[in-house]
Image (cartoon, coloured by chain):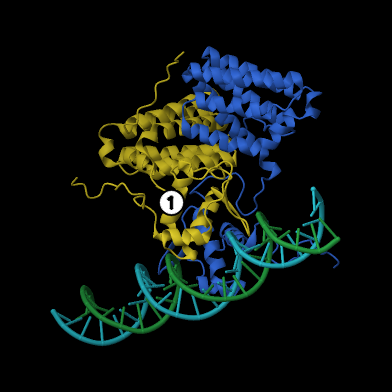
Chain colours: A blue, B yellow, C green, D cyan
DNA sequence: ACTTGTCAGCTTGTCTGACAAATTGCCCAG
DNA sequence: CTGGGCAATTTGTCAGACAAGCTGACAAGT
């Protein structure tokens, strides 16, 4: 077995997390998701975990604190740490905290979620935008246009454009969630505006979709804005090889 | 100033968190959000925090671990703890972790976000539902109908109905986010199906909206399903006194 | 027989002190 | 001026101890 860095076949081969406490937290989280601890069960005491994993109590406590922050367990002084009824529902994450990566097979679903959000946001933006919102939209659009013509990187202008739509929707929660989703697509946007993508027309196509979206918002056409935003997200997904799911009715 | 429970003017008046570490984490989180520490800044060392707040290093470390889990800071051994570029973007929360409560003024925005999600989900469900999905939808609808006629509590059937829509949309991320949002409205659903609401027709109205939504999904009418879902959420908001925001264009 | 009060053991929360590992800045030799 | 290396600083981990709170059993009383 000459392998030196490859993971071994024991169950300590799911690191991907930094430090002892991170690894222990990841192992406990996967154990909970795997069903080793049912909701309502009390997981081993700190002393037992110390003996079982050969680490200090500080590491165990920090690992459990992370599970607590992730909404997997809830601790009560004197009683113990208990698995909550609905694990992972305290906050919403895209990538599981134990792996830290997005499965490529799930990209289509995430694009779809983003399409729903962007469509709803564009619809509200078309209804509620004021003069300041329109000015911000046009400024970002002009910056993208200049980047497109000069061949520069328009990724930051792209961010500004979508952020301006979020602002124009006048719903902080919607905007926060949209930016939360958007940050997981920074690599995608970088690809769209990369110099290599200038030749195949990716950036130009994206800008055309932006123009349609901007026009709809300026005109106050809510439904057209929603369609334009969703088409834009789906086109972006297609540009990066993420196949949109079929919408056939099966009955 | 006879007030006894009103918050005092010192900065130690934001408990709502359990334990010393929780309070310290809340204070640091609010300090970061207030701008006392800019993104990229290094916050005080553990020793300084120990001296400043009069707690042990274990408490300080646990508080910082919480901020790290919430995505506010990032620690590097030997260097210190640094505020991340975009605080609070590692995961999505409805209620700020330092207060734990939802501001009533924000309820309208949250209802709107839920309306966007439920509409998009219903639209997808109308396109993709299969026979099993339809069976689950009709079962949940029948349970709600029976609860309505017998005067029982139909909250759990209501949950099942919306969960069936999420399943029929065939997008796990969309479903997870929908259930994540829905759990913040358990009190709302309980009110709808409470015995006191049976007389004013709240439950009957909700069930009528459910019927329209179910019919649209069964017919595969995507846009009608989206409208029905959104109207249902907005009607639910109106039933609980949350005024929907005006949609007038201001330019 | 049932209730109630007490208590001992266990578990988490906090404190203290120490050492290991990693980073940073500075000094100094070249 | 440049580069290496050293020392101070800082986070990560370990170990032991006590405080605070919970649980179950047991004894006393009704």
A151 versus B161 height, above or below: above
Instruction: Judge left or right: residue A246 versus residue B119.
Output: right
Report x, y in % for residue B75: 59, 54
Task: Please report the residue visible at 53 percent of the width from the left and 45 percent of the height from the top.
Answer: A92
B141 versus D22 height, above or below: above
**Mark 1 — on which chain does it sit?**
B
Task: Please report the residue visible at 29 percent of the width from the left and 31 percent of the height from the top.
Answer: B201
Report x, y in % for residue B15: 36, 53
Q: How many marks overall? A: 1
Report x, y in % for residue B120: 54, 30
Closer to us: B231 or B33: B33
Closer to us: B90 or A48: B90
Quarter the N terminus of chain A occupies: bottom right
Q: Is residue B136 visible?
A: no
Task: Please report the residue visible at 25 percent of the width from the left and 49 percent of the height from the top.
Answer: B5
Report x, y in % for residue A9: 74, 65
C3 versus B38 height, above or below: below
Instruction: Judge left or right: residue A44 versus residue C30.
Output: left
Task: Please report the residue visible at 34 percent of the width from the left and 42 percent of the height from the top.
Answer: B190
User: 10 Å neighbourhood of mark 1: few (<14), some, or many (≥20)?
Assistant: many
Q: To which quarter of the image does residue C1 belong?
A: bottom left
Q: To which quarter of the image does residue A237 belong?
A: top right
Query: In the structure shown, which secondary structural element does the residue marked by tag 1 occupy?
Result: helix
Q: Is residue A194 visible?
A: yes
State the residue position of label 1. B26
Quarter the C terminus of chain A occupies: top right
């Amino acid at each position: 077995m000459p392998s030196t860095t490859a993971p071994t076949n024991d169950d300590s081969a799911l690191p991907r997390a930094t430090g002892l406490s991170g690894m222990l937290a990841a192992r406990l989280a996967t154990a909970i998701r795997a069903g080793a601890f049912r909701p309502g069960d009390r997981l081993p005491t700190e002393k037992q975990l110390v003996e079982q994993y050969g680490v200090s109590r500080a590491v165990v406590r920090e690992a459990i604190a992370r599970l607590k922050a992730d909404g997997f367990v809830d601790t009560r002084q004197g009683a113990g740490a208990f698995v909550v009824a609905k694990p992972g529902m305290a906050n919403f994450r895209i990538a599981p905290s134990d792996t830290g990566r997005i499965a490529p097979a799930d990209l289509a679903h995430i694009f779809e979620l983003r399409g729903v959000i962007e469509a709803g946001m564009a619809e509200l933006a078309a209804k509620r935008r004021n003069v300041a919102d329109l000015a911000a939209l046009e400024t970002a659009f002009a910056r993208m246009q200049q980047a497109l013509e000069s061949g520069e990187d328009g990724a930051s202008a792209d961010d500004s454009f979508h952020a301006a739509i979020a602002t124009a929707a006048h719903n902080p929660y919607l905007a926060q969630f949209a930016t939360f989703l958007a940050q997981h697509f920074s690599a995608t946007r970088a690809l769209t505006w990369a110099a290599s993508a200038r030749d195949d027309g990716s950036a130009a196509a994206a800008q055309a979709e932006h123009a349609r979206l901007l026009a709809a918002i300026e005109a106050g056409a809510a439904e057209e804005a929603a369609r334009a935003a969703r088409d834009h997200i789906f086109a972006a997904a297609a540009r990066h090889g993420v196949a949109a799911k079929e919408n056939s009715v099966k009955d």
